[in-house]
Image (cartoon, rainbow, N blue to C red):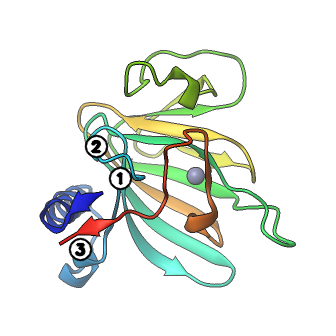
């Protein structure tokens, strides 16, 4: 849960970061930035800000913002009906991101909360900087974390059904509750 005030402050901060990264967005779009706390109520630690630019029945384009050291928790995009699940490419516009996927354990750093190791199981790190990108296959687990300066990224994918995403952390609820 986050308050309306926290939501607006996060939208403003994310909007400024997007503009500072060189991506033009309107004031209306800043008000539409989705602030996601994953039901964990510590947005700055585990959370993400999402501006959806395109969402059709086939494709999705989003701008993702991570604040400094903010972590998007481990998740995957499951099959839905005949769709094998979302295939997604994340491309870095600004900042450095540690991106974790299945494979050899090359873990460097980043478990966001002491004692939550069991919620972050994939440990193969790819360090991404502006201009770098990574493509995730449907169903592939992933989590990622911005370094000190935060990060702005593009996400290009097949249709996004965010509400159906699966998370390793059983305490996560994808749809954030905003309290007035
Ligand atoms: Zn994802």
Q: Residue 157: x and y, percent?
A: 62, 65
Q: Are marks 1 and 2 in contact (CB under 8 Å)?
A: yes
- Label 1 and label 3: CA atoms lie apart by 17 Å
Residue at 47% over, 25% down: 116
Image side of residue 26 versus residue 135, left or right:
left
The residue at label 2 has a CB less than 8 Å from ligand 1: no
Residue at 84% over, 72% down: 81
Q: Visible in this render: residue 120?
A: no
The residue at label 1 has a CB less than 8 Å from ligand 1: no
Q: Quadrant of residue 163?
A: bottom right
Number of marks drawn: 3
Quarter of the C terminus within the rendering: bottom left
Q: Residue 98: x and y, percent?
A: 46, 31
Return the residue at label 1.
37
- Label 2 and label 3: CA atoms lie apart by 21 Å
The residue at label 3 has a CB less than 8 Å from ligand 1: no
SS for callout 1: loop
User: In the figure, 178 relative to 174: above or below?
Assistant: below
Callout 3 environment at 10 Å: few (<14), some (14 to 19), or many (20+)?
many
Return the residue at label 2.
42
Q: Are marks 1 and 3 in contact (CB under 8 Å)?
A: no
User: Which label belongs to residue 30?
Assistant: 3
Callout 2 environment at 10 Å: few (<14), some (14 to 19), or many (20+)?
few
């Amino acid at each position: 849960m986050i308050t309306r005030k926290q939501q607006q402050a996060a939208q403003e901060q994310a909007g400024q970061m997007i503009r500072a990264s060189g991506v033009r967005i309107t004031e209306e779009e800043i008000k539409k930035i989705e602030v996601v706390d994953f039901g964990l109520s510590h947005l700055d630690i585990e959370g993400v800000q999402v501006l959806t630019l395109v969402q059709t029945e086939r494709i999705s384009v989003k701008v993702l913002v991570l604040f400094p050291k903010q972590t998007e928790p481990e998740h995957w995009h499951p099959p839905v009906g005949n769709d094998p699940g979302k295939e997604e490419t994340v491309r870095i516009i600004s900042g450095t991101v540690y991106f974790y996927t299945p494979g050899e354990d090359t873990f460097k750093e980043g478990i966001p909360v002491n004692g939550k190791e069991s919620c972050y199981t994939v440990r193969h790190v790819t360090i991404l900087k502006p201009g770098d990108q990574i493509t995730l296959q449907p169903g592939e687990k992933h989590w990622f974390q911005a370094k000190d300066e935060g990060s702005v990224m593009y996400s290009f994918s097949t249709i996004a059904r965010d509400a159906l995403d699966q998370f390793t952390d059983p305490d996560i609820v994808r749809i954030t509750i905003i309290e007035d």
